[in-house]
Image: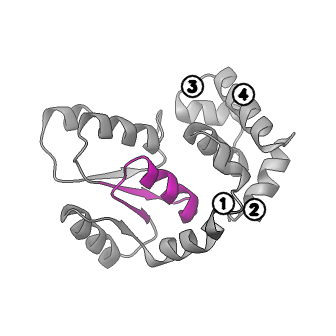
Amino acid sequence: MKLVRSDEWDIVLLDFSMLGKSGLQVLKELRSMRPRLPVLMLSTWPDDQLALRAIANGASGYLNKDCDARELTTAVQRVLGGGRYVSDSVATDLVFNLKLGLDSPAHGRLSDREFEIMLRIAAGKSLSRIAEELLLSVKTISTYRARLLRKMGMCTNADVVRYAVREKLIA
């Protein structure tokens, strides 16, 4: 963020998972500081749900880190040219998962931070590990966990894992 404040940049490649802050939080800060700066988000998490959140928060594009170099080059060129980019697989997933807006998934009610914590819980991480990764207290993570469980009508981390697998949010 210091570099973005002090220098001019043509584009930012931003990872969704970062130490301390989520990529979505950084994206929001970038948007308020430099609204016209193109931001291409990258992630290893399943594509469609993160892509929706990234684009809704102002990302110019979204790619999975597993993409090949040609696709990354195409995405960077398109975003630098003022366009938007998502891979064909993400676009297909987005279209088929929208279901004409009739069946909004339970995780759609979560805040970006709650969603991020849900993914980490679903990946089998402990609350203390999540707190360590996000540079937050275990109590704060526990509060987010309680909120996401309440919003989704769940009781346990196992419920979160089952849901995430069923909804293809994790492999």
Q: Earlier in the sequence, mark 4 or mark 3?
A: 3
Q: Which residue is mark 4?
A: 142
Residue at x-position 18% and y-position 65%? 81
Task: Between label 3 and label 2, give the one nearer the viewer.
Answer: 2
- Amino acid identity at mark 4: Ser
Residue at x-position 27% and y-position 74%? 74
Assign the C terminus to one quadrant of the image.
bottom right
- Amino acid identity at mark 3: Leu
- Asked if labels 1 and 4 touch by Cβ distance under 8 angstroms, the answer is no
What span is in magenta?
39-64
- Asked if labels 1 and 2 touch by Cβ distance under 8 angstroms, the answer is yes
Q: Which residue is mark 2?
A: 165
Of helix, strand and loop, which one carries label 3? Answer: loop
Question: Separation of disc 1 and disc 3 at Cα?
Answer: 24 Å
- Give the side of residue 64 with respect to residue 85, left or right: right
Question: Separation of disc 4 and disc 3 at Cα?
Answer: 10 Å
Residue 169: numbered disc? 1
Q: Earlier in the sequence, mark 1 or mark 3?
A: 3
Q: Earlier in the sequence, mark 3 or mark 2?
A: 3
Question: Separation of disc 4 and disc 1 at Cα?
Answer: 21 Å
- Give the side of residue 164 with respect to residue 67, left or right: right
Q: Which residue is mark 3?
A: 136
Residue extending farthest to the right is 155
